[in-house]
Image: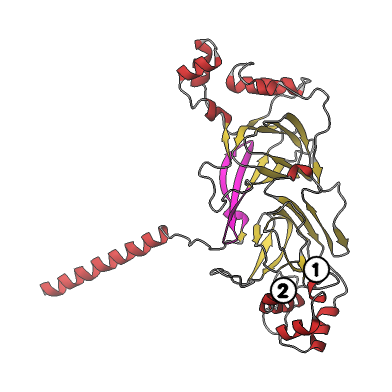
Amino acid sequence: MCTKKLLFLWFCLCLIILCLHVTTAKEDEIVPSGTRHLLVKRAERQTFISTEFGQVSGASASDGNETFNVQFITLEPNSLFLPVMLHQDMVFYVHTGSGKLSYKDEHKRENVTLERGDVYRLESGTVFFIQSDLDPTRQKLRIYAIFGNVGEDLREPSEYGPYSSIRDLVLGFDEKVLKETFKVPDEVMEEIISGRKPEAIVHGLPSTKKTMQDKEIEFIESIFGSRSTFAIFETINKDKKKSNLFNIFHEKRDFENCNGWSTTVNQKKYSVLKNSRYGLFMVNLTHGGMMGPHWNPKATEIAIVLQGKGMVRVVCPNLPNQIHCKNERFEAEEGDVFVVPRFHPMAQMAFNNETFVFMGFSTSTKNNHPQYLAGKASVLRTLDKHILATSFGVNETTFDRLVNQQGESVILECTSTGTGQWPRMGKKNPEEVILTLSSKAWQTFP
């Protein structure tokens, strides 16, 4: 009887240890290096700052080689994102609302008026803050940003984050150092050190007829208590020349037809992006429109869905060392982030019942020249037909029918189901046929 009890107790103990091991393994599970995380849903974003006046959230997506960190800055009308210093270059897009960006880098000090569609770049080491307008429509200022420097290893996000609070950087020194540095009376320094730390996003300054310069000095005084403490904010361009801004809606589109339009922003169009890590792009697909199957020879794309939803198909090109690479198909909707790695054939499709609009950042500011698989711009039409037919395992007549039927280019018409799902059994849609064949014949392409 005792033996049976001991065996039973031993069995229970083993079961408990096994359960603890499984639980610990799940909690401590490490995602292998090289694992891809191409889609990040809106609900998966991490919140960094949240106050009644605004929020900052972020999403990290990976192509298996690098992790890309995108931040979403949202300011309520008449709110302030307090001064920070950038650790990395910041390229951003203004999605909605309007406001003012004030910054100081090693070259200049500027005030920039922001509106929907604006693109801007701030270099690492820049000190900046943002104020949203008190818009009559009460529209929020929404900014989408990505961070990263050319030549740096971006496989892991910085442990310090992309920026630091100016207040924290200054008050990190002890009282004696601060007194000797700023030469202010003891009571001023004591008040600064003992002052309550404000939240990162606060209510904006009162609306007055004061100049922008007066507003900024008052703002700095409210934090640091001294007009002379930060003289960098007291210099301003007196000629008030127009800042070198680029607005994606004010420029001619790269391509447009009845199925949608697309445009890119690179250093040729916008000189501020020279020596930057990232360029930008925007795609607007109408009902049933499809960005034709293509791949990027020079850039990985990190996209954010601005409106509607659609299907994204990414094909694995069977490159060396792509252990975790596989063909993927997923639905992306407003607020989601998705990544398409360099050299991976892709297609983005809108459903019949809504548009699919997305913008994003590409890891190249130079001309990328996407390679399209179908239509007038097809790379398949430029290569030896006999050799290509052989690589596809078909005769030349069949290959001709595949390549020459499509008369459109870049953005195609591709009727989908209105429910958001492509047929998975029986018939295959045109993009799937082309993408599947291109995956098999990848070695043929230069």
Magenta residues, start to end: 41-70
Sequence-wise, the earlier of marks 2 and 1 is 1
Q: Nearer the viewer, residue 5 or 78?
A: 78
Q: Nearer the viewer, residue 185 or 241?
A: 241
Q: Is residue 245 left or right of residue 194?
A: right
Measuring from the top left, give residue 134's x and y in whole percent.
75, 33
Classify the position of the N terminus by image quarter.
bottom left
Q: Is residue 424 visible?
A: yes
Amino acid type shown at disc 2: Phe
Q: Residue at x 57, y 46 (%)?
A: 47
Query: Residue 298 falls in which quadrant of the image?
Result: bottom right
Measuring from the top left, give residue 311's x and y in whole percent.
70, 67
Measuring from the top left, give residue 164's x and y in whole percent.
56, 35
Task: Identify the residue position indicated by label 2 in the image.
Answer: 445
Query: Residue 381 falls in which quadrant of the image?
Result: bottom right
Q: Is residue 413 left or right of residue 313?
A: right
How many C-alpha atoms fall within 10 Å of the one at disc 2: few (<14), some, or many (≥20)?
A: few
Task: Identify the residue position indicated by label 1 in the image.
Answer: 288
Tell us which disc is closer to us: 2 or 1: 2
Q: Nearer the viewer, residue 203 or 224?
A: 224
